[in-house]
Image (cartoon, coloured by chain):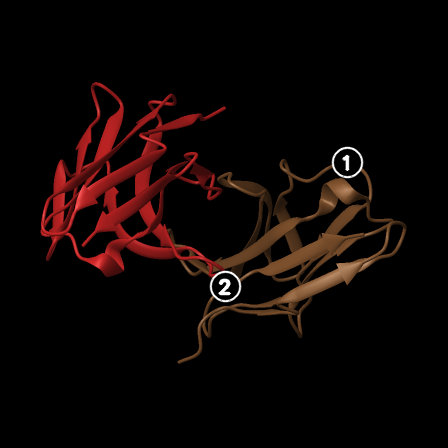
Amino acid sequence: GENVEQHPSTLSVQEGDSAVIKCTYSDSASNYFPWYKQELGKGPQLIIDIRSNVGEKKDQRIAVTLNKTAKHFSLHITETQPEDSAVYFCAATIQGAQKLVFGQGTRLTINP
Amino acid sequence: NAGVMQNPRHLVRRRGQEARLRCSPMKGHSHVYWYRQLPEEGLKFMVYLQKENIIDESGMPKERFSAEFPKEGPSILRIQQVVRGDSAAYFCASSKGETQYFGPGTRLLVL
């Protein structure tokens, strides 16, 4: 079955700097890759997603890149702000399978 | 335009009791998913349901756990004879396509 590895497990950056979180997946049939942000005591919130027919997608300060050949995808947050502090999860799914396979999460801390 | 709703938000049970977790999907969504999150870990898929049908239960423990999504009313995740290892956050998600939207979760504590 699909396996998703996420790195780093913790990340600390200065406010205003960029943050990058990387994920790799094992099943080449995976074709949908969402990213979720989870704040303490809350449910995961979708922040951006990408499908396998696209190499990059951007939404304001957030961007995701996908390398299908290498089977990895990354989340990029620019101009980080204190409210970006949270745990971020990547996930992957195979078309038709519906279930999401999540990475282990990255605890991002933005230092003022 | 309510999101996914879950109740209760917190549930305390003693070993051997039953836990019932409820999930109301977003309006217009016919797909419901349940995930479990242990402390400091990612979410693990449990079950995927559509109205009156279990589509994929490959992540459900073989015993004590069951799920349903009746024609009317919320989806229910039921855990019988709870043990301490069942303590976790249980999240429900709903979709009408690929994108899954999550509820706030139910935090189950087994004493």
For mark 1, what is the residue? B62
Residue toward you, B19 or A18: A18
Nearer to us of marks 2 and 1 is: 2
Quadrant assignment, res B10: bottom right
Q: Which chain: brown? A: B
Quadrant assignment, res A55: top left
Q: Check the image and report above or below for B99 versus A14.
A: below
For mark 2, what is the residue? B103
Disc 2 chain ID: B
Residue B34: x and y, percent?
58, 51
Q: Residue at x 81, y 44 (%)?
A: B83
Residue B98: x and y, percent?
37, 51
* Amino acid, disc 1: Lys
> Label 2 crowding class (10 Å Cα cut-off): few <14, some 14-19, many 20+?
many
Q: Check the image and report above or below for B68 versus B82.
A: below
Cβ atoms under marks 2 and 1 closer than 8 Å: no
Residue toward you, A97 or A62: A62
Q: Residue at x 55, y 41 (%)?
A: B45
| Residue A29 appears in the rendering | yes
Q: Name the tint of chain A in the rendering.
A: red
Real-space CA distance between mark 2 and mark 1, rounded to the nearest whole angstrom: 25 Å
